[in-house]
Amino acid sequence: MQLKGPKRLTTAMLSATVLGLNACTASSGATAQSPAPDAGTAQSAQSGVGTPGAAGIGDPDFPLDGNGGYDVGHYALKLAYDPPTKKLSGTASVKAKAVQSLSSFNLDLHGFTVRKVTVDGKDAKFAREGDELTVSPAAVIANGTEFEVAVDYAGKPDPVRNSSNLGTYGFIPTKDGAFVTSEPNGAKTWFPCNDHPSDKATYDFDVTVPAGTTVVANGELRGDPVTSGGTSTFAWHEGHPMATYLATITLGKFDVKTGKSPGGIPVYAATDPAFKNDLGFLYSTSAKVTDYWSKVFGPYPFNSTGGVIDDFSTGYALENQTKPMYGGFEPDESIIAHELAHQWFGDSLSITRWRDLWLNEGFATYAEWLWTEHNGGLTAEKTFQDYYSAKTAPLWKYPPGVAQRQDLFNTSVYLRGAMTLHVLRKRIGDETFFKLLRTWTEQHKYGGVTTGEFVQLAEKLSGKQLGGLFDAWLFKPQRPALS
């Protein structure tokens, strides 16, 4: 995620980024885990009697995001969207594995009319309350059993609006289609899901739209679009695990350029006709940045790279897996470098709790500094010193190690997160630091990560005790001293 405008995180905008930050007190750096089953649940699982899956996945800051009782393996979304009427309809099939004996379970879904639900092909009872779709299968799903739930639904998507975190996000209708960016919890505005980054899955998207409309989703096309009867169906597949907030089916009128990077990675770039002059820049910059990060952070974790510029002003960019989205502006190299660094830090390695967001944004921001230095601009050291010199900035009152529910994208999460990495780099040396980054991305590829795991690995590879460094830079509401 990268903000545009007054909060754009560059050295030149220092005076703007240090304004309006909220103060908070630090809490423990420990990452919350899913709640352990109580005695009744454990006894029921042993006896074969099912119990309901929890209505939340266990994130204390977002207690109703995600759901308990199962782990999703794959989403198959067969959808149709009509831009003039703004109606989305279709079937979402969710393959999952029960992690307890389930008498019922929840899916996150905001809005829509649910027409039918089946579990393993058999009709299931269902009920709605808020954004929870509760499914009661005909028989208990035993612990460890794989099952498939299919939900037929239709309606007009209702994105999240006026959020303190990001303004508008989710499935956002546009004049010629839709702009789909779902961080942190907007996936439920367009498909039923386990809407939390700790439950990742693979995806198939089969999306039917009026002929002449292009659908851009994650991963790669499974073939040419099929056009018949005035509609076209695009089939995309993302075969690597992906968090729900990174999924997209952005659609509209687009110019498309495809090929391979100099390093051999397939590239897919698309721009709205209003940004047709930026297509070549987006394509070439995405290619060279991906190749460079593959040397710095380790092999690129996915099968393709690229990006999309749509003519819809959101004021931000989002690192949708394999297809970063740029909302209504021309991204510069620094923003593209940020979003593509996220393909490692945030997409392949995903946070298991939102409070650890600095592991995404701090790393991607530091990547911006590295990219600028790589291209002959300010060094990472000079950028660090420029920010550090703001002695009274509200930046120091917001410890980035525990991102706040109503202020996830506070500037401190980006800047102090990046500064933490620079201080760490100076403490352990370049050789160990970049080995740490490559080891981190390799050991946790396609998985979930916590701050504690990163600290542990840094200490292991460096042979140094680093608790004081991380405590000062991530968890204390004050400007750390430089030793």
Image (cartoon, grey):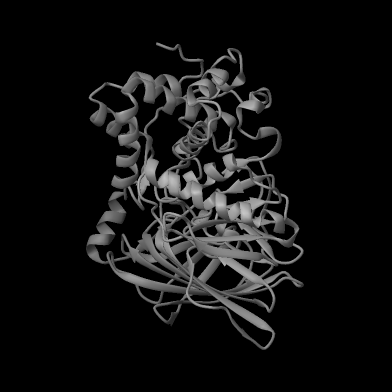
| 350 horizontally vs 224: left or right | left
Of 69 and 383, which appears nearest the observer? 383
Locate residue 66 relative to residue 1 in the image: left or right: left
Residue drawn at the location 34% of the way across and 27% of the way down? 430
Q: Residue at position x 51%, y 22% from top?
A: 384
Viewer-closest of 240 and 82: 240
Residue 456 in percent (x, y) is at 28, 32
The quadrant in which residue 44 appears is bottom left
Image coordinates of residue 160 in percent, x first then y, are: 65, 52
Q: In the figure, 132 relative to 457: above or below?
A: below
Is residue 470 placed above or below 3 in the rendered structure?
above
The residue closer to the viewer here, 425 or 175, is 425
Residue 466 appears in view: yes
- Direction bottom: furthest residue: 229
Q: Quadrant of the C terminus?
A: top left
| Residue located 64% across and 35% down the image | 8
- Measured as percent of width and height from the top left, residue 100 is found at 31, 60
